[in-house]
Amino acid sequence: MNKKFKTIVIGIVGICLLLSAVVYIKYFTDNTKAITKEFYVKIPTGSKYEEVKKIIAPYVKNMSDFECMASLRSYEKNIKPGRFLFKKGMSSYSLVASLRKNVPVKIAFNNQERLENVAQRIGSEIEADSLKLMTSFRDSLFLKKNGFTKENVIAMFIPNSYEFYWNTSADKFRDKMLDEYRKFWNKDRLAKAEKLGMTPEQVITLASIVHKESVKLDERPRVAGAYLNRLKQGMPLQGDPTIIYALKLRDNDFNQVIKRVLYGDLKIQSPYNTYINLGLPPGPIAQPDISAIDAVLNPEKHDYIYFCASVEKFGYHEFAATFAQHQVNAKKYADWLNSTGTKR
């Protein structure tokens, strides 16, 4: 009797071990193919189970095993949109688990010249395309409610690194950027803007000109100081970067490279021409980085009104408090440009 009982027990244990081995092999061993190391799978919003299977099919070795595990874990009834990480060697269990862990996308952007460029940049990283993003950014109710215009709403996008889920909608992305904008404009920055007699949008508009005028971070507070001196004296800003922006806008070509502003260019009829229009242009001519914004908020105190590119310190400028001295500096730079053959 004991031997018979032992035989039965051993048989049951053996069957259990065999079943365990089958289950382990079926659901907990490598079920991937065509994956060298790791790969992100994107499941669009509103996807059905059959659509998910088509998306992941190129990377799953045995779809039947995946389907069994998906059914056991009720995945087929709980599809999540997003960006999911697949790795080489993942089992069916791991694949289903991975499809429940939405991995954020890290997005960084700066120095985009137009809102369209911002939308294209973001649209290449998240599910919402550039058209949906532009529609959201320029929504009239949103603009009115938050004090923006179509020309200056680009100021809302503070250049930095952010994390978003891939399936973030256009409106949610926009609203997140508004939150970040409000956080950026803390009490200290708002107080400095008010002291200058400027709104945050105006500060960023001027910062965009400073940003384009000088690539040298240590020089930007001096450039900002010169522009602010012009504004205080009621002078036109006379910023060459605004002329370049106006030319690109006129030609509808923001890929062209303009190295030299000609005298005739200064007459272009555009609200962005700060040679013929007093004050600031309607909005930023690019996304200024934070150093340029803070340069406007913390400008260097001096008497300089004029500046032009230096031929002795590449990337920097020569500053002058008088027009006579500026003419000397400007002629030196013009002569250098002529010697290089630069026409445009």
Image (spheres, helix red, strand yellow):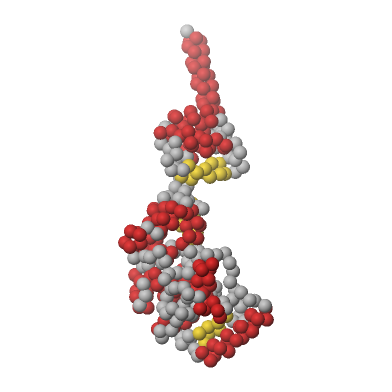
Return the residue found at the far top: 1
Horizontal side of residue 244 vs 151, given as left or right? right
Position of residue 222 measured from the top left corner of the image (x, y, whole percent): 49, 80
Horizontal side of residue 106 vs 337, given as left or right? left
Position of residue 311 measured from the top left corner of the image (x, y, whole percent): 62, 82
Q: In this view, does 298 lie above or below 68?
A: below
How many marks can you see? 0
Q: Is residue 61 visible?
A: yes
Return the residue found at the far left: 145
Which residue is depicted at the point 55% across and 65% down? 253
Which residue is depicted at the point 54% across and 67% down? 251
Q: Is residue 168 above or below residue 70?
A: below
Position of residue 17 measured from the top left corner of the image (x, y, whole percent): 52, 22
Which is nearer the eye, 44 or 133? 133
Which residue is depicted at the point 41% across and 55% down? 135
Q: Is residue 91 above or below residue 136?
A: above
In the rendered image, which quarter contains the C terminus?
Answer: bottom right
Horizontal side of residue 72 vs 31, given as left or right? left
Q: Is residue 335 above or below residue 111?
A: below
Which residue is depicted at the point 47% across and 51% down? 129
Which is nearer the eye, 171 or 8? 171
Position of residue 22 measured from the top left corner of the image (x, y, whole percent): 54, 24
Q: Can residue 316 be seen in this view?
A: no
